[in-house]
Amino acid sequence: MKKLNMLKGFVSLFFFLQIIGIIGSLVLATIFLFQEGDLDMPLKLNGTTIEVIDFPTKIAIFFVCFGYAAFVYGIYLFKQILELFSQRIIFDDRIILNFNKIGKCFLATTLLTAIPVFILEIISENRTSNINFTSGGFDSILFTVGLSLFFMVLSEVFKIAKTIKEENELTV
């Protein structure tokens, strides 16, 4: 139980910091969405340097903000699951549903942040960025897709475990 409380504390702190980050990101995104032309200082969007705000860049910023919001919502759902675990509620429909939602949120985060930036890199004039297939790290698309699928599989495992538990309680 001590590890669960530590995890809850870390996730709560992380969630709080993400809320602050999303508020700041939305303010900056709003400023950039109403700006046209060259930037005084370059903006980095998921590793891609942006020097000119044009229509495709605005669309990419818009999608990245939604991806960030989906990530924060996934962390919020994980925080709820940890709260249920601390109340010793394990095989509940809320947990099963939240694990599935977390997987979908993380998958949406990956797609909403990676694809628009990739398209922006393709249509940009300078094409200075390259495709990097690194083998590790949280910024790896393969890792984040795998993590999202893990949460979806975990949802299915909990659903199976709940069914087995209910069957065992009926057979005395």
Image: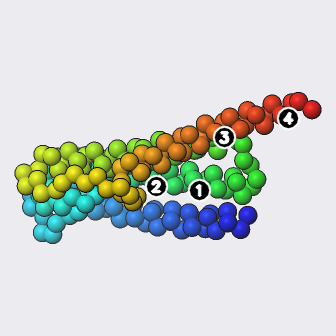
Verify CB contact (< 8 Å) between mark 2 and mark 3. Answer: no
Read off the residue under disc 1: 79
Residue at 20 percent across and 64 percent down: it is 43
- N-terminal of the pair, mark 1 or mark 4, is 1
Q: Residue at 17%, 50% (x, y): give it.
A: 121
> Which residue is label 4 attached to?
169
Place residue 107 in its image quadrant: top left
* Contact? badges 2 and 1 (CB < 8 Å): no
Mark 4: few/some/many CA within 10 Å (<14, 14-19, 20+)? few
Percent position (x, y) of residue 14? 50, 65
On screen, residue 74 above or below 51:
above
Marks 4 and 2, Cα distance to the nearest angstrom? 37 Å
Secondary structure at numbered mark 3? helix
Q: Quadrant of the N terminus?
A: bottom right
Identity, as a three-letter code, of the amino acid under mark 2: Val
Location of residue 117 in the rendering, given as x and y in whole percent from the top left corner: 24, 50
Q: Which mark is residue 158?
A: 3
Residue 68 lies, with reference to residue 111, above or below; the image says: below
Q: CA distance from mark 2 to mark 1?
A: 10 Å
Residue type highlighted by circle 3 = Phe
Nearer-N-terminus badge (1/3): 1
**Numbered disc in front, either 4 or 2:** 4
